[in-house]
Image (spheres, grey):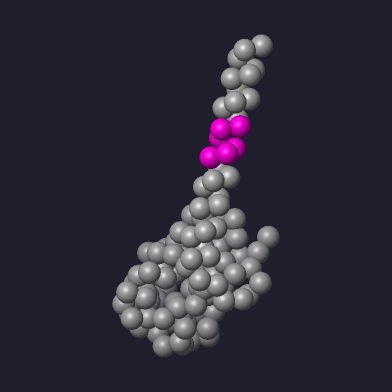
C-alpha cells in the first residue's frame, strides 16, 4: 500500500517546524533539522491510515498558519492537497459507517434465528 507524506516547501529549518513536528514524532531537534534540510518527509503514513492523515492535516494547518509553506504528496509521490485528504477521510468514514450498519443487520438476523 502507498503512503501520504508532508514536506516543508523550503529547506529552511526554524523552531516552529521543530515544535510542531515534536508534537507528533519523538525525534530530536537535530533530526528534524536534518529532515528539513535534506527535503525529506516531516511526517508520513499509510494511505489507509485515517489517524495519520489527520496528523498530516494538523501539521499542514499549523505550519501554514505560522507562515511555513508545505507540500503534501500522495502514494505516487505526486503533489496533492488538503481537499483530497479531506475527501479521503470522508470516504473512510462512510465505509466504516456502512460496515457497521451491515454488521448490525447481520447480528439482528442471527438473533432472529
- Name the image quarter holding residue 10: bottom left
Residue in the image at 40% along x and 85% along y: 13
Point out the image quarter for the C terminus.
Answer: top right
Q: Is residue 96 above or below residue 65?
A: above
Q: Is residue 106 above or below residue 33?
A: above
Q: Position of residue 65 (x, y in %)?
A: 32, 74
Examine the rendering and report whether any part of residue 38 can be seen.
Answer: yes
Going by the image, does 72 lie left or right of 102? Answer: left
Examine the rendering and report whether any part of residue 22 can be seen.
Answer: no
Q: Is residue 77 magenta?
A: no
Going by the image, does 25 lie left or right of 106? Answer: left
Q: Is residue 90 above or below residue 76?
A: above
Which sits in the foreground, 97 or 1? 97
Going by the image, does 93 lie left or right of 1? Answer: left
- Name the image quarter holding residue 40: bottom right
**Residue range (magenta):** 97-102
Residue in the image at 35% along x and 83% along y: 14
Question: Which residue extends farthest top?
Answer: 113
Q: Position of residue 103 (x, y in %)?
A: 60, 30
- Name the image quarter holding residue 22: bottom left
Residue in the image at 55% along x and 52% along y: 91
Residue in the image at 45% along x and 78% along y: 70
Prevailing secondary structure class for the magenta stretch in the rendered image = helix
Amino acid at each position: 500500500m502507498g503512503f501520504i507524506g508532508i514536506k516543508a516547501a523550503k529547506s529552511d529549518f526554524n523552531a516552529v517546524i521543530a515544535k510542531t513536528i515534536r508534537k507528533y514524532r519523538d525525534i530530536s531537534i537535530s533530526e528534524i533539522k536534518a529532515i528539513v534540510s535534506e527535503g525529506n518527509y516531516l511526517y508520513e503514513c499509510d494511505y489507509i491510515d485515517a489517524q495519520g492523515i489527520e496528523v498530516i492535516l494538523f501539521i499542514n494547518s499549523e505550519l501554514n498558519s505560522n507562515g511555513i509553506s508545505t507540500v503534501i504528496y500522495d502514494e505516487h509521490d505526486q503533489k496533492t492537497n488538503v481537499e483530497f485528504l479531506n475527501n479521503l477521510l470522508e470516504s473512510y468514514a462512510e465505509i466504516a459507517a456502512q460496515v457497521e450498519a451491515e454488521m448490525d443487520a447481520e447480528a439482528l438476523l442471527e438473533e432472529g434465528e
